[in-house]
Image: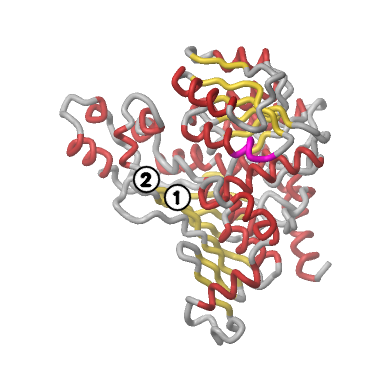
Amino acid sequence: MKQFDRRKFIQTTSLSAAFASSTSLFSNNLRSSNQKYMGNFAAPKLDKIKIAFIGVGHRGIGHIMRFSSFPNTQIVAICDLYETNILKSESIIKNLKTYNTNIKLKTYWGNENKWKIMLKETDADIVIISTDWNNHGVMAIETMKNNMHAFVEVPMANSIKELWEIVNTSEKYQKHCMMLENVNYGREELMFLNICRKGLLGELYHGEAAYIHDLRYQMYEEEIGTGSWRTLQYEKNKGNLYPTHGLGPVSQYMNLLRNEDTFKSLVSFSSPALGREKFATENFSANHKWNKLNYQNGDINTTIIKTYLGRTIMVQWDETSPRPYTRLNLIQGTRGILAGGPTRAAFDDGFEGFSNNSKEWLKGDGIDALYEKYDHPMFKRLNQITKDLGHGGMDGIMIYRIIECLRNGKPLDQNVYEGCAWSSLIELTSISVNNNGQPQEFPDFTRGNWVDTNTFDIIP
C-alpha cells in the first residue's frame, strides 16, 4: 500500500470512530443483533433467475425487454395499475424466445394493492420496481420481507425514514436492494472511473454532478404516464427531487461510502419557482388542474456537498429551464480534470502528443485517442450485446451486470447504502432550502462500516 493510501486509510478509520460516537447520525438506528452489514454482500448463486415486475409502463416494459435479452432469465409475474399496460406486456412476454410455456405468467392489475398480492403469490427471485417515486420505498421493503431481492428505479425512496427502513430490512433478511442507477454504466462514466482508478488525475478533490433536463413536455401526460404524478412533485417538495443520475458516478469516482471517504454534510439553495407556472398558464386552460397547483419548488437547485476528507461536490437539478440536457459529470484532481457532455479532458502533463499541458481541453482526435486507450474493459466486453438496449447501452450493461452478479454469487456493483445515501439528498436538500441553506449532516446508513467496504474496482 502506498504511503498516501495508508495515511488516507488511517484518517478514514479514525473518522469511523467519530461516527460511532455521534448519535445525531444514527437517530436511534443502531444495528440489531439479527442484522448483518451488507456492504460486501454476495447472495447465493442463482442458476436461472425468476423475475417479477411491479410497474410495466414505459420503463417497466423496457426492463422486460432487457432482462429477456439474456439467457437464464424467466419472467413469472407482472403487476400494474392499468390493464392496458398488462395486456401490452403480456403480449411481449409471450412472444419472447425465452418464454417458458410450462410456467404460467401471473398478471395483476386494477387495484393499488395488487402488488402486495403478487409478492405473496409469486416465487420470483428478484422484483423490478418501476412505479412512481412515492411507492419505491414501501415496495422494496415488502419485496425483501417476502424473501426476494429488490431492484428499484431511481430514487430508492423519498424520505430518510424510509431509507433507514430499507437498510434495516436488507440487513435483517439478507436481501439485495439495489437502486437502478443506469448512468453509472454509461460509456463516458465508465471511462472516467477507469482513469480515476489508474490515478491519472492525481488526488481527487472536487466533483460536479447534475440532472438538467427540460421535462416540461411531461405535463401533457395529464392522467397516465410520468407527468401525471411527477408534475405534482413541484407543489409538494422543495430542493433536489432527482439527485442520483449525476451524483452516482461522481460518488464512485471518489470511492465514497467505500474504504476511502464518505459524505459529511451539505448546503442547498433553490431559485424562484417560475417556469412550471408559466408553462401551465401558456399551454393549459385557466381551470386546468395544472393551473391550480402552487408551484413552490425552485426551477433550479444547487447543492454543495462536503465529504469527511474535505472534498466538495456541486450537485444541480433542473427539470424546467429551456436549456440543453447535461449531467455535468466533472471530476477534478491534482493532475488533471475530466468533464462530460461532451467529453472533455485536460492533464497537467498533457496527453500523448495531443496536448502539452492542462491549459486547453483535449478535442477531436485527442478525445478519440483517450477513449481508445482508457475505455472501461467492461464496456469493451459488453457494448456489442447491449448497445441497443436503452440509453446508449447503459441500461443493457446494468441489467447484464445484475444477472452476471446474481448467477455467479458476486456482490452487486451498487450496494444498498449507496442507493440510500444518493437518494437522501431529496429530503436533506429540502430541509436545507427551507432553512435558508442551513447545513445538513448526512445519515451514515453504514453505521461506520464504510471503512470495511471494498473499493468498487475496475471489473473486466
Q: Mark 1 points at which residue?
A: 211
Query: Image height check: is 128 above or below 271?
Result: above
Please indicate, yes or no, whether residue 14 appears anywhere in the rendered image: no
The CA span between labels 1 and 2 is: 8 Å
Tag count: 2
The reply to whether the C-beta atoms of the residues labelled 1 and 2 are less than 8 Å apart is: yes
User: Overall secondary structure of the magenta stretch?
Assistant: loop
Q: Estimate how packed mark 2 is, as few (under 14), some (14 to 19) or many (20 or more) residues with alpha carbons within 10 Å.
A: many
The vertical placement of 358 against 266, above or below, is below
Is-magenta flag for residue 418? Answer: no
The residue type indicated by label 1 comes to Tyr
Residue at 49%, 27% (x, y): give it.
Answer: 134
For label 2, the SS is loop
Q: In what quadrant of the picture does the N terminus appear?
A: bottom right
- Which residue is labeled 2 in the image? 319
Report which quarter residue 38 is drawn in. top right
Q: Is mark 1 on a helix, strand or loop?
A: strand
Residue stretch rendered in magenta on the structure = 66-70
